[in-house]
Amino acid sequence: MSESFEQYAERLHAVAREASKSPSIISTSAEIDAALDGGPAETLRRVVGIGERKASGAFFTGSDLRTKAAKLLVRKPSGEEVFLDPACGAGDLLLGVSQHLPVSLDLQETLNLWGQRLAGFDLRGDFVRAAKARLFLMALKRGARPGRRFSIDQRRLFPLIKKSDALQLDKPFKNASHIIVNPPFCTVDAAEDCTWGSGKVSQAALFIHHILENAKQATRIVGILPDVLRTGSSYKSWREQATGKARIWSTSIIGRFDTFTDIDVFLLNLERRENPKTSQASDWWDSASAGVRVGDLFEINVGPVVPHRDPTEGPEYQYIHSKALPPFGRTCGSRERRRFKGTTYKPPFLAIRRTSGPRDKFRAVGTIVTGNEPMAVENHVLIATPRDHTIDSCSRLMDLLRKEFANDWLNQRIRCRHLTVSSLEEIPWRL
């Protein structure tokens, strides 16, 4: 992996040297255009398998997304800002920022100016080298031209962009006025002193937490983050801590990260503030607090049976699981039975598949379950038990879930692959 991308990074520097000697090729070179828009990502996909990229969190930001992120961050540059990307990769987000920076006709002056205002870190030296070469090419692309005696000094080129682990640093965050980041989305073990999560947690959450712990007051921050951080129940405490240290200006749903990556993301736009206000769900999504909601009429629970973990011990029950449920149909139970010591549920209730995504025709697919005896329910099923204990209420909820309104609402509320109890509870009751 390293050697292949290292060769690409070296090629980018060779192209930069050629362009500095013959600036006229900037406007005609397809290789330079590719280097500034998608070339590193294409190279990475070609030389590194998807499994390895997922494990390391190596996914470069596309040009459309980097432009959206940079526009959120850079409003009216005053000339004194320092822009930091603590997970800079091959420099895509810094390229987006550089398009808002002033350009001198003299290339060396432009590089000196940008070098004082663009900072970044990455664990991989070849990524850092690629980022510096691409920023050099962007300066040429924007009209800066080398003087007669110009030569590239690799040691002084963008001195604030370095190979390092940003999560082990604090000073660069205090020096930055603006921070932009597309952190790794892979999961890692939470530290023992982590106050908002345990077990496996998203590294993206760790990055934002570290940023908020170390950034100075009034620092503007924009992050490209997996949607699970915005909506996942396991990140509720993380969200509460984030809103205790920052004012959230906006959360913008983006959809898929790119055409090659099946994960939904959002743009988080916030400003570092100490105790800005009490945390609210509306900081992250439209919580639909007004009017009747599904949770007012139904008790929502996650099926408690974990098939391959729970022992087959205890009383025997009918067993409800997602594969045996007819979509938007009705069943009077199941022919399958299993022993289970935990909580069971007595019909009528609406069984709703937990696994769904924003590209599915229906986000919440329900099945009315009837019968006279308690049932064991798999953990891939959400159980909506009507508070009036009637089949008619189950039928009305199933009708609601088939409406376009419900699909649209859920796609705004949660875009990760598992529906949560709260996401169903908060659906407005509109029939």
Image (cartoon, rainbow, N blue to C red):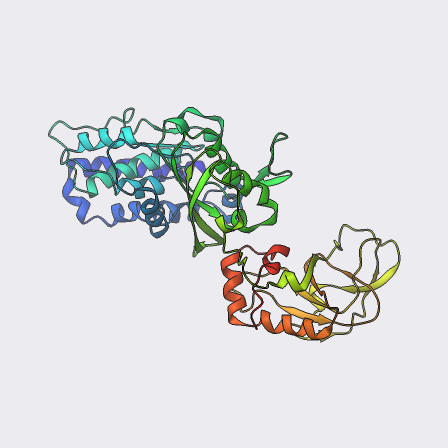
At horizontal 43% and vertical 30% (from top left) the residue drawn is: 215
* Total tally of numbered discs in the picture: 0
- Choose between 401 and 263: the one closer to the eye: 401
* Left or right position of 84 against 396: left
- Outermost residue, front direction? 291
The structure residue drawn at horizontal position 40% and vertical position 27%, both measured from the top left corner, is 174
- The image shows residue 263 at horizontal and vertical percentages of 50, 53
Residue drawn at the location 51% of the way across and 69% of the way down: 405
Left or right: where does residue 383 sit relative to residue 279? right
Image x and y of residue 326, in percent? 68, 73
The vertical placement of 320 against 17, above or below, is below
* Residue 337: image location, x then y, percent: 83, 64
Residue 204 x, y percent position in the rendering: 50, 41
Q: Which image quarter: residue 339?
A: bottom right
Residue 382 can be seen, yes or no: no
Q: Considering only vertical position in the picture, is 337 above or below 73?
A: below
Residue drawn at x 49%, y 35% as measured from the top left:
275
Which residue is farthest left?
Answer: 148
In-image side of 92 versus 315 (left or right): left
Q: Is residue 188 visible?
A: yes
The quadrant of the rendering that contains the C terminus is bottom right
